[in-house]
Amino acid sequence: MPGDGSPYTAHPPTDRAAMLEAVGAERVEDLFDVPEAVRFDGDLGIEARSERAVRREVRSVLDQNADLVEFLGRGHHAHYVPSVVDHLADRSEFLTSYTQYQPEVTQGFLQALFEYQSMLVELTGLPVANCSLYDAATALGEAALLAARVREASGETVLVPGHVAPGRRAALERYVDGAGLAVATYPMAGGTVDVAALRDVVDDDTLLVYAETPTVRGAVEPALDAVGTAADDADALFCVGSDVLALALLEPPAAAGADVVVGEADALGLGTGFGTGHGLFAAREAFLRQIPGRLVGATEDETGRRAYTLTLQTREQHIRRERATSNVCTNQAWLALRTAIHVATLGAEGMVDLAEDQVRYARDAAARLDDLPGVTAPADDAHHFREFPVRVPGDAARVRDDLRDEGFAVHAVDDDLIQVCVTEETVAGVDDLTAALAEVVS
């Protein structure tokens, strides 16, 4: 019963007055500490315009954006998303769905999520996968918390590569702080794990060892088995980070002894959102009831027909807070659906072909850049997937900025390294990037 004319306020004035009295406030506004300078005064200060005028003004603003060819990677990769993904995922029954609580009205969506989980199971080699988390960073944080809950290891330290992306490590540290865990790094040799140094670091206090393939610098990790063995020897859990396209070409992490696999699933289905994404999470069956988020399972209805339902929802909305494994609430399911559609569109052979292209694009682009005087590409002795580091003469940040002035965006990794990511979306611009870099470093 709206009491103030608002269709969104369910309480009449008498109810609101009683609640305010209970908390010792005179007005609803007293419950919020909003500085006067930023309070809404009832006037947005926006002149009314026609639709045509608004379009013209917005277009003039957007035209001021820099028109850059983005050779950017390090977790966000520009892959072509087939139009069928948009056409199917934008259907109202998918786009307006929240969580699929009612299986009797959401069988189609539940089946799609079940297929998504099945795809991850096949790609990772692990028997259980959930229907997505926020991104790779939060998936890694959830893996560390899972390790703390199952306590197959007695340690308190999560070991991550020295090259791990700063944002991913920061998210991990925030996740594990409340559990009393610490995050430490182990050394890298070039672009991959220094196994001997790792063995010196792993000890009885190690709870989880995390390794990536490909790494944040695009290097394919050749010693994944050895990393898994080092973790196992210390009775620590082994977590592997990857992405849904790379896994189509690489050996399943389970074959290297991975207990948990995390990473970016948005490499297919989403394009580049530079922030919008969703994380993959797969684990051994022993951890079934400790996996965060939601799991879709297959069952039968009362007539014996195959049916789908949310079988495990170990989050605090569904069970007692103290038993919850996560607070993943947002509808990541729609993003998982997009990835499932993209993967299904490509098929197994198409996935492998596209993954092999990423190896070839990186190899060929590195060869072109390596021919430039003073440039070394790749800057490490490794096989690369999509992206690779490039050693440049002079200050890498200056080279990055000068390339931006020429219309190209790359990462500056440290003082003398830039990083270049090449996919099917940017491979046509490699010649122009090569010419621009030659000019910049000359």
Image (cartoon, grey):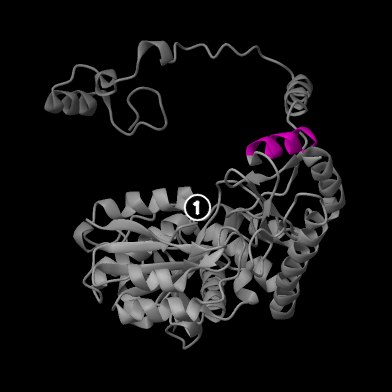
**Left or right, residue 22 beside residue 295:** left
Q: In the rendered image, which residue does mark 1 sit on?
A: 165
Q: Quadrant of residue 152?
A: bottom left
- Magenta portion: prevailing SS class: helix
Q: Magenta span has 96?
A: no
SS under mark 1 = loop
- 291, above or below 333, in the image: below
Question: Which of the two residues, 431 or 332, is positioned nearer the viewer here?
Answer: 431
Please name whichever residue, 37 or 159, is drawn nearer the observer in this view of the structure. 159
Location of residue 299 in the rendering, given as x and y in whole percent from the top left corner: 44, 83
Image spot of residue 312 (x, y percent): 35, 71
Tag 1: amino acid: Ala
Segment tinted magenta in the rendering: 397-407
299 is higher (above) or lower (below) than 143: below
Q: Is residue 403 magenta?
A: yes
Residue 49 located left or right of residue 114 = right
442 relative to 34, above or below: below
Q: Position of residue 351 (x, y in %)?
A: 70, 74
Q: From this viewpoint, is residue 21 visible?
A: yes
